[in-house]
Image (spheres, coloured by chain):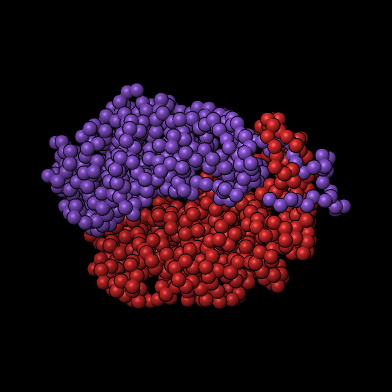
Amino acid sequence: MSHETTDHATDHATDNATGDACGCPEYAALSRRGLLRGTLLAGGVAGASASAMFGSAFMETSYAATRSAPRVLVVLSMRGAVDGMSLVVPHGDPVYAKARPRIAIPGESLLAANGFFGLHPEMAPLLPLWQSGKVAAVHATGLPVPNRSHFAAMEEVEDADPGTTRRVGWLNRLVGRDSYEHPLQAIQLGAAAPPTSLIGPSHVAAVQQIKDMKLSGHDKWDTKNRRPRSMNTMWRRTGGPLGAGARRALRAVDDFAPVRNGAATPRNGASYPGNSSLGDALAAAARTIRGDVGAEVITIDHGSWDHHDNLGTLAWGQMQSMTREFSQALAAFFTDLGGLASKVTVVTLSEFGRRTRENANYGLDHGHGNVMLLLGAGVKGGYYGTWPGLTNTADADLLVTTDYRSVLAEVITQRLGASPAAVFPRFSPTPVGAVLSR
Amino acid sequence: MTHGDGTAVSSPADEVGTPGLTRRGLAAAAVGSVGTAVVGATAGEAAAGRRYRPRRYRATKIPGSATRHALTRFSYGWTPQLQRQVAKAGGFNRWFDRQLSGSYSDGWYRTTADWWPTTNASRDRLVGMVDSGALSSFWQVDINYQRWVLARRTRSHRQVQELMAEFWEHHFHIPAQGLVGPYRVSYGKKLRSLALGRFDALLPAAVLHPAMALYLSNANSSRSAPNEDLGRELLELHTVGRGNYTERDVRDSARLLTGYRVDKWRTWRYTYDTAHHWTGRVSIVGFTHPNAAPDGRDALRAYLRHLAHHPATARRIAHKLAVRFISDDPPASVVDMLTRVYLANDTRIAPVLRALVRSPAFRSARMRKVRTPDEDLVATYRALNARLQRPRGNSAAADGIVWQARTLGNMPYEWGSPDGRPDTADAWSSTARFLGSLDVHYMMCGGWWPNEHIAYRRRRAWLPRKSLRFAKFVDHLSRRMLGRSSTSTMLQAACEATGCQPWTVITPDHRVMKWELPRLLTVFLDSPYHMKR
């Protein structure tokens, strides 16, 4: 570093009473972590750090500012509305095959079939999990009132608070249930724009790829932490979502280090599907969970499952190829987690299901009832839900007999110890039985 | 000088301290959760305010704040060149009228169209390229399209037309992801050509385009089983919007749309086949038609005309324009006013835009919008005067620009569902977006990436004089890049980023000019003044 010219010219009007360019010692001695904590902490856990100078580099011991998340909920949104009757097939309902002469999946090819339900054959990678009792399928779930608009239904599912116009997502309420506030408590993986379920006052993060979670310019040459300091100054007082987002990012980026520095290679021989955004996101989720940075909620979007045409058959089409990718990715995720799988529960969700009767394009139009899958820790495997019976008319779809919130309520109560009343206002859940008691 | 714990400070002059700001002061200045605007200033901050009192470098001209505001909304980023175009036109309103009437050169559009072999290729030529294996898939055609739209926005003299082309392409969104065969480029060109015209011309152009027929399944729909996909989104997304139609309307909408076909297996020809058209009476949101003829296209056009002029459509378009150009939550009064203008002008767009820029709601909505990822990216090119050149080879900037957009969180027209990418601060304020923006800004400020077939300003060109004080240099840079004078926060951040003091004399030989200019330039782009508009 060259020495600064600091002559005080006449046009320099700063009130520089101290006459030197160095500020207070405490300020200079704050390590980067301490500095970020000090400026950005919004209540909750204060991170203390002790720093010592060796040459010009900070060597710091930092007391973790993130708490560990003892249990993790992964919410996988199957965007575009998956056909639940192709994933978990109600072969015992005679209307199913009649309504779908070309795309119905024959009963004899189903996996894990009982007298009524069976799984799509491309779900084979998940069969070991199923057989060990770690997968539950709850059928005929959904919104209480049909809504065939993707966008209105998605908003309603993720807001989960009918009767208010405030845009706060149910997962945001979930992580906001205690005094702990940290953007890494809930992370959207694989996309920069958070889903509605995460929107709200509690701090959350979005990560496209783990390697992107870095503060550019804060590199090995930035020995004096100039970059984070100047950014904290710049964004300290900016209002609105971007100001809040900037401060959260500056805070999150530091505490994400254990994940960023963790090995990128999947563990335990896990093999994610190639060229798959879902596989990439789930691999990132496994790394994030291993990094133990306090992520209690992870959201992942996958789709489009909006198969108005070319949903197809077992031999061709989007359903078979996407179900294969979906199942391979989830199976790899649980393999990758190894022992950590004992704390991770996955829930799959769509905005609605699809019509009972196939259309002329080997596809299905928008419907209502759907299947939800629960996988992993605390799940009581098997088929659940009350089957309403199908009707074979042009406009008929699967009726909803279980409000989707009842399924979610059971998960958050039994797994995370949350109160459903705070997360799903004005809603009384009915028991589903797919999750083990705490 | 020693610290309390006995460690030595390297060089006093390198430490940017804030007199009087102690740990306690820092804690007091802690910022709360969502939406915090201003917290009480501490004594330390007051001292910092005095220390970092901004200086003015008036030789670098900036527009008035109202003009700057209008230009950041109606261009892809203020530049000195844009300012000259406005001055020459005689002020913003005249410039805006000239923009709306297509008076400025479209040379840049034509120049950049030549940069990729797929941009001006005919349908048959594109199909041939994919069939022969010259291109691996139509996805490659579409990614070149994404590159082209970004390149167009960086230097077009027709900024308003480009903005409105983007607006309509999001309104009638079709992902540029290789989903619609050879048709995505021609779809974009078509909408751009109509972008400043009338909605009742845009609507049929979009809805009846083969790209839309393919994306929303209408090319497969038939009289025996009308596919609902397009029939529904036409009502929900393109025209009257949620709450203004019933499931019965969707059904008849789908029926009336039947008859179109695309030969997806061979020629990709787009045809109308009366054998596939559903005939019979339809009744949709106040439109009724016997629809008895085998060829339903006249009935369909009448239906689209009805939708374009429908008050609910007017309101939806008015609201969307207000969200795009005013704020995420525009006042109902301005939406009402724009709705009336739209209807009174027979769905013409230009009068609506003129009314919008003259509204008090627009004038008072400064810095209320967060730039979307692709807007931030293009504005970065413009602020740095980084000029794309014809791409050659594999790592040209004009090709790499889409990967930059991905880093920021959204490639143009990449959004996966037919509602198009969101246009609100909530969607684009995440950790990923913020850190992605900072990364792209810094790489470009250094000229490190992209760095092939792109012209950056010479570093020396950023210094307006042989020698000036840092505070004035900061003001010059703020004026040059953002079109506004510097603030105390900017000066403090710039000092902290570089280890300079406000009174430090900067010369071409100063370390900031020799080594650390990227660390300084990026401060301006990494600011709310660049990431918002």
Check the image and report above or below for B30 versus A193.
above
Name the one closer to the observer, B138 or B14.
B14
Q: Position of residue A149 (x, y in %)?
A: 38, 48
Tell me the quarter of the picture where residue B138 sits.
bottom left
Residue at 63%, 72% in the rendered image? B98
Check the image and report above or below for B272 versus A105.
below
Q: Position of residue B449 (x, y in %)?
A: 53, 61
Residue at 28%, 27% in the rendered image? A433
Q: Is residue B379 left or right of residue B146?
A: right
Residue at 63%, 69% in the rendered image? B97
Q: Position of residue A280 (x, y in %)?
A: 37, 48
Residue at 45%, 30% in the rendered image? A68
Name the one closer to the observer, B318 or B397.
B397
Q: Position of residue B356 (x, y in %)?
A: 61, 59
- Asked if one can make out residue B342 in the rendered structure from this viewpoint, the answer is no
Name the one closer to the observer, A394 or A360.
A360
**Can you name the residue that lies furthest to the right here?**
A10
Chain drawn purple, letter?
Answer: A
Quadrant for the N terminus of chain B in the image: top right
Name the one closer to the observer, A40 or B466.
B466
